[in-house]
Image (cartoon, rainbow, N blue to C red):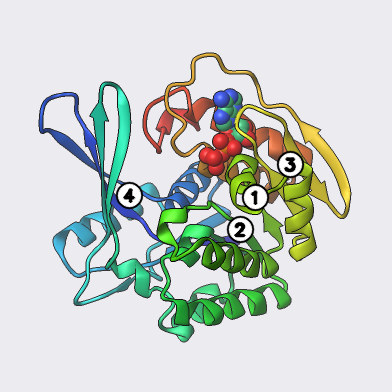
Amino acid sequence: MTRILAIGECMVEMAPMGVADTYKMGFAGDTMNTAWYLRRLLGTDHQVDYFTVVGTDSVSDQMLGFLEEAGIGTDHIARHVDRTVGLYMIQLNDGERSFSYWRGQSAARTLAQDDTRLENALKGADVAFFSGITVAILPKGDRARFLAILAAFKTAGGTVVFDPNLRPKLWESKEDMTSAIMKAAAVSSISLPSHEDEAEWFRDADSLATAARYAGAGARTVLVKNGPADILIHRDNAITTLSPEKIDAVVDTTAAGDSFNAGYLAALLQGASEKEAAAAGAALAGKVIRSRGALVAHAT
Ligand code: ADP
C-alpha cells in the first residue's frame, strides 16, 4: 500500500449557474484538486489522504462528506471550534470570469499549529504533496516548523512533492513570497513549477532557468510546465522536453496545473519513467481544460 498525504486548503466554491443570482456550491482548492484526481487515477493499492483544518459547522461537515465520497481519507483533518472553511465566488461579467475570496481567517490557516498532528499524519506516508498556497496561508511563525517537518520526512526516505503555485495576493510582499517559496523548494524532492508564473517574480529567462533554480534549491526532479509550450524535465542534471498535445478548443484552464500534477504523480507511482509520467500529466490536463470547472470527472 502506497500512501499519499496532500496538505493544504480546500474551499467552498460558489459558481454561477447562468441564471441571475443563482450559484452552485462545490469544493475546490489546488492541493485538494490534485488529491481528487490522484484518487480517481490510482487503484486500491494507493491511499490518498488530505491534511487540513475545517470548522465544526455544517458546511465543514459537507466538505468532509464530499472528500469521503470522493474516496479521499479524512482521518487527518482537524476541526477548529472558532473558525470555518474559506470560500470563493466566481462571477461572470460578459463571459469573463472573476474571483472573490473570503479565506483570510479560514480554519486551514491553522493547519501547522500543531507539529505532532502533522508528524502523525506523515507516519507511514510515502509521498507528501503541498504547494506555495499551503505555505502562503500559514502565519509566518508556523512556516519554518512546517517545512522542518517535511524536511525530516524527506530525510527519513519520504518523497516531498511541491507545486510553487505563486499567488502574489496571498503574500505580504514579493520578497516574502520569493524567499518562502525557495525555502519550501529546498525541502522538496520533486518541484513542479509553471514557467509563466515564475518568470515574472524570479526573472527567469526561460524554462531552463526555472528548472535550474529549483534543482539548485535541492529537488532531484524538476518539471517545468508552461501552458501550451514544451514541458521541461530536469532530473539529475539531464534535461528532456515534451510537447503537450495542441488543443484548439480550450474552454477553461482552471486546474490545468493541478490535474497535470496528479496525472504525472499517479503515473510515476505506477512505475512510469519521468517522460512517460509527464506525458500522462499533460494528457490529463489537456482533457481537463476542454471542460468547465476544476474537477472534471470524465477526464479520468
Ligand atoms: P498552471 O495551471 O499551473 O498555470 P500551466 O498553465 O503551465 O499550469 O499548464 C499545466 C499543463 O496543462 C501544461 O504543462 C500543459 O500540459 C497543459 N496545458 C495548459 N494550457 C494548455 C493549452 N493551452 N494547450 C495545451 N495544453 C495546455
**Which amino acid lies under the numbered mark 3 shown in the image of this protein?**
Ser
Q: For the residue labelled by badge 4, is the local secondary structure a helix, a strand or a loop? A: helix
**Which amino acid lies under the numbered mark 2 shown in the image of this protein?**
Phe
**Which amino acid lies under the numbered mark 1 shown in the image of this protein?**
Leu
Instruction: For marks 1 and 4, give the CA distance.
Output: 28 Å
Q: Disc number at residue 207?
A: 3
Could you classify mark 2 by the number of other residues whose Cα lies within 10 Å: few (under 14), some (14-19), or many (20 or more)?
Answer: many
Instruction: For marks 2 and 3, give the CA distance.
Output: 17 Å
N-term mark: 1 or 4: 4
List the residue tagged with mark 2. Answer: 162
CB within 8 Å, label 1 to label 4: no
Q: Disc number at residue 192?
A: 1
N-term mark: 1 or 2: 2
Rendered location of residue 36, percent (x, y): 44, 47
**Which amino acid lies under the numbered mark 4 shown in the image of this protein?**
Glu
Q: Is residue 284 visible?
A: no
